[in-house]
């Protein structure tokens, strides 16, 4: 039984255990400033600032980031102008454009992707 106002039932995180936290920045949205989130995030709009993600970052085909990216995993179909630091994998899809250095454990660059920068892989 759930009792409202009971301190035993209050949680700091409103999500349920095991529930994924997914954030979305939609097409036509512009954000100026840094973004930080613990879960996953998908960017289909424009971000002018650094993006720090605890889990997976997906930049859709209409998405762009002008700033540095820090995430557990990064998948790019759009544009990133800045450095990428990924703990696990970085995937540059066929029509993506990345201008900046990539620091990652694994990288996949599909045919048609544009990558201008250096890549450093850690084992």
Image (cartoon, rainbow, N blue to C red):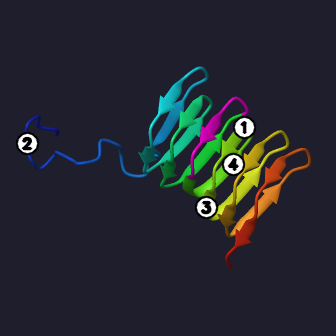
Q: CA distance from mark 1 to mark 4?
A: 9 Å
Where is 104 relative to 25, above or below? below
Which circle, 2 or 1, is nearer the viewer?
1
Q: CA distance from mark 2 to mark 3?
A: 41 Å
Pointers 2 and 4 in contact (C-beta within 8 Å): no
> Earlier along the polypeptide chain: callout 1 or callout 3?
1
Query: Range of the magenta residues?
Result: 61-68
Q: Which residue is the site of mark 3?
A: 86
Q: Which residue is the site of mark 4?
A: 75
Q: Which residue is the site of mark 1?
A: 78
Residue 54 screen position, x and y as percent: 48, 55
Residue with the most extreme top position: 28
> Earlier along the polypeptide chain: callout 2 or callout 3?
2
For the C terminus, the image quarter is: bottom right
Which residue does the image show at 37% across and 51% down from the upper left? 17
For the N terminus, the image quarter is: top left
Q: Which residue is the site of mark 2?
A: 6
> Earlier along the polypeptide chain: callout 4 or callout 3?
4
Which circle, 2 or 4, is nearer the viewer?
4
In the image, taking residue 112 as reference, residue 7 lies left or right, namely left
| Crowdedness near tag 1: few (<14), some (14–19) or many (≥20) residues, C-alpha within 10 Å | many
Pointers 4 and 3 in contact (C-beta within 8 Å): no
Q: CA distance from mark 1 to mark 3?
A: 17 Å
Pointers 2 and 3 in contact (C-beta within 8 Å): no
Pointers 1 and 4 in contact (C-beta within 8 Å): no
Which residue does the image show at 71% across and 39% down from the upper left? 79
Based on the picture, tell me whether residue 87 belongs to the magenta stretch. no
């Amino acid at each position: 039984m759930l009792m409202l106002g009971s301190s035993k039932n209050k949680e700091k995180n409103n999500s349920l255990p095991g529930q994924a936290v997914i954030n979305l920045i939609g097409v036509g949205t512009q954000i100026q400033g840094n973004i930080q989130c613990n879960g996953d995030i998908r960017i289909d709009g424009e971000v002018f600032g650094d993006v720090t993600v605890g889990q997976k970052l997906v930049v859709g085909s209409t998405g762009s980031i002008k700033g540095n990216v820090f995430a557990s995993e990064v998948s790019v179909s759009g544009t990133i102008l800045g450095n990428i630091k990924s703990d696990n994998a970085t995937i540059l899809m066929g029509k993506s454009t990345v201008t900046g250095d990539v620091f990652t454990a694994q990288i996949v660059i599909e045919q048609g992707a544009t990558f201008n920068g250096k890549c450093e892989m850690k084992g």
